[in-house]
Image (cartoon, grey):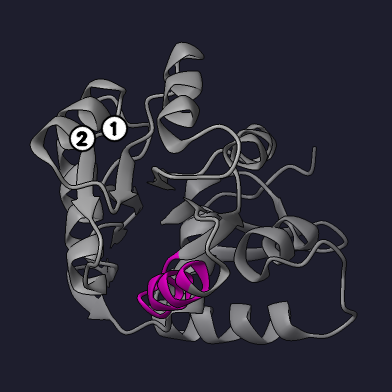
Amino acid sequence: MRLLLTEDDPEAARLLADGLVASGHEVVLASSAEQALELYAQAPPDALIVDRMLPGQDGLWLIAQLRSRGVRRPVLILSALGQVDDRVEGLRAGGDDYLVKPFHLSEVLARLEAMLRRSADSVLSSRLAVGDLEIDLVTREARRGGRRIDLTPREFRLLECLMRAAGQVVTRRMLLEQVWGYQFDPQTNVIDVHISRLRQAIGDDRLAPLVTTVRGAGYVLAPGLVPRVP
């Protein structure tokens, strides 16, 4: 899952982001509500984690701005304000859940998963399937033909990106930005190595191949499809 975390405390942001990344999620950081709006516009995440007390405009202002623009992504509010009235205000402002500081990472993860399950309007389905390959975005599990596939968090994110664009060419630059967070090509074979490992993990060497290399363009994931380069 791609998350936008808005937190102005650098240490708190780092600790939470590290925990989320270790759990297999991609995290984009913003230190203010204004910056979060800009980052959202550039690349909408799957869900948002918003600290209520921020410099300048606060977290409730951010949520109100997003909701007024038709954004229905799940939002988890984090706050040191834990009175009943505070929580009610946060939920009425458009938050999907409200977690009082201090908190444990396991509870953040559980609440994110619960928000995703409840969010009928979310653009994110809890499962993606291409042919006999399926991934669960909540449990972070992958299966092919019913057989569970062991993937690293990076491999899972790579597979997720390919499956979201099933049947379309995904360029190296897109993968670098979405999976590794690079805004440039570091001129390494890191993508080739991970694609090779992913192919082996999902059984492309034994079963009908799903991942195809499009020379000079990138990669495409589709069962029995010869991709067209746009």
Q: Which mark is residue 86?
A: 2
- x and y percentages locating residue 225 in the rendered image: 56, 49
Tell me how far mark 1 sits from mark 2, CA to CA.
Answer: 12 Å
Residue under pointer 1: 95
**Which secondary structure type mostly characterizes the magenta part of the structure?**
helix
The residue nearer to you, when weighing 155 against 215, is 155
Q: For the residue labelled by badge 2, is the local secondary structure a helix, a strand or a loop?
A: helix
The residue nearer to you, when weighing 19 against 186, is 19
Residue located at (25% from left, 46% from top): 81
> Which residues are the magenta region?
12-25
Q: Would you say the residues marked 1 and 2 are in contact, meaning their CB atoms lie under 8 Å apart?
A: no
- x and y percentages locating residue 87 in the rendered image: 17, 36
Name the quadrant containing residue 146. Answer: bottom left
Residue located at (43% from left, 20% from top): 64
Q: Is residue 203 visible?
A: no
Q: Residues within 10 Å of mark 1 (few under 14, many from 20)?
A: many
The amino acid marked with disc number 2 is Asp
The amino acid marked with disc number 1 is Gly
Q: Is residue 182 magenta?
A: no
Q: Earlier in the sequence, mark 1 or mark 2?
A: 2
Residue located at (64% from left, 35% from top): 34
